Amino acid sequence: DGASIMAALSDLCDEAEEIRSDIEAELKKWKRGKQGKKGVLRRLISRFMCLIKFMMWITLGSARSALYQVWLQLTTRTNPFDAVKQDAEKKGLAMSGQRAISWCDACPLDEAKRMTQILSKASGSNITVNDLFVSCISAAVTRQLIEHEEFMAPVDAHSRKRVARNINVCIPVHLRGGVILPNESLGNRIGAFVTRVPGEMTHDARGGGTPSCPSDRLMKVHQSLKRSKQSPAPILSHYVAKFCSSYLPEQWTKNIFQRANCNACVAISNNRGYKDKIHMNGMTVESAHGFLPLPPGIPIGVVVQSYAGVMSLSVTAEKWAVPDPDKFLRWCLDEYSRLLETAAKLEKSQ
């Protein structure tokens, strides 16, 4: 997983000792904050109450997550890209194993953070950088589906048949928040959840009427991700995947993974890198880019990554799903530019 790779890279770089010291200092600071100035009895009571809250969260949250997963399964019978794959197979374009990849720097990290602060203040919510880029990527997926449909059978923007109003996305989650402690072994501590975000909206379609503000999409994405992030779904998925991989036949495990994706169009991973450039044997590592192996049944994978104050994007996709990965990333950046423009207008009005 991405967190393990970044941890391995930190062990190899010239700043390895400094990075370990920073992690240990942050861990001690966190522990001091948890303990505070409470007495022994108050700490015991506090831990007991935390345990009760955790048990209620895991019990009720698991039931809610399971029901939401079933609802996604029942209401998403097919993947919007299935028709694209069938059309590509008829034309002999769906070659097995062919991948399309691309990567680019998206924006300065400080700019993205500032944008989320402005949009959060205007909406009264707590929009994150991850919300921002999931919104941009979902807009790009929708534009990709629109292009496929126009290529297969040109239709008017108001009478689309295959471009859904909503799409499912799969979000991998590191159970430790992307942190691997010093002297801790590397390993897969990844869970995931599937959630529903907007597909085609008015401003995506050519000639589709009055364009809507891209912040409408962002707010819906934020609300959907917030609901799923607060659930125990990533923890449950981690242990279910671990059980299946350890005890079930490989083909059964693959089928379970594919069904659990709820016909998601894209998997989006967010990896946090180092705030400053690192060095290896005195040489500067100018940039770092990760690529997401495609989960079973999902045709597109995108990694959102920060390194040395710069946000970057990479896409790995089935060639039939994303014929031009450079264009796909341009669509992501187009949506980002629209949101940046919206944030600039809101900042002036504030």
Image (tube, helix red, strand yellow):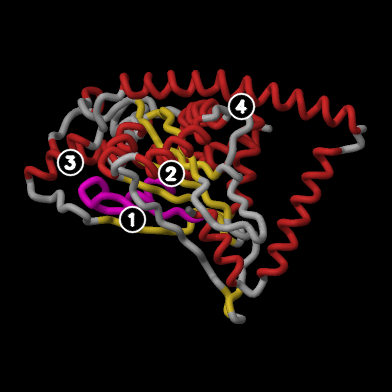
Q: Residues within 10 Å of mark 1 (few under 14, many from 20)?
A: some
Mark sitting on residue 289: none
Find disc 3 in the rendering and name its residue: 85
User: Who comes first in sequence, dot 2 or dot 1?
Assistant: 2
Discs 2, 3 touching: Cβ within 8 Å? no
User: Which residue: 51% across, 42% down?
Assistant: 173
User: How far apart are the alpha carbons under marks 2 and 3?
Assistant: 21 Å
Asked if residue 31 lies left or right of residue 8, the reply is: right
Q: Residue 181: horizontal and vertical position, in percent?
A: 66, 55
Find disc 4 in the rendering and name its residue: 123
User: Who comes first in sequence, dot 2 or dot 3?
Assistant: 3
SS for tag 3?
A: helix
Discs 2, 4 touching: Cβ within 8 Å? no
User: How far apart are the alpha carbons under marks 3 and 1?
Assistant: 20 Å
Q: Residue 315: horizontal and vertical position, in percent?
A: 37, 52
Q: Residues within 10 Å of mark 3 (few under 14, many from 20)?
A: some
SS for tag 4?
A: helix
Q: Residue furthest front?
A: 247
Look at label 2 and name its amino acid.
Answer: Ile
User: Who comes first in sequence, dot 2 or dot 4?
Assistant: 4
Look at label 3 and name its amino acid.
Answer: Lys
Q: Is residue 316 above or below residue 248?
A: below
Discs 1, 4 touching: Cβ within 8 Å? no
Which residues are drawn in magenta?
Answer: 310-334
User: How far apart are the alpha carbons under marks 1 and 4?
Assistant: 32 Å
User: How far apart are the alpha carbons under marks 2 and 4?
Assistant: 24 Å
Find disc 2 in the rendering and name its residue: 268
User: How far apart are the alpha carbons under marks 3 and 4?
Assistant: 39 Å
Q: Nearer the viewer, mark 2 or mark 4?
A: 2
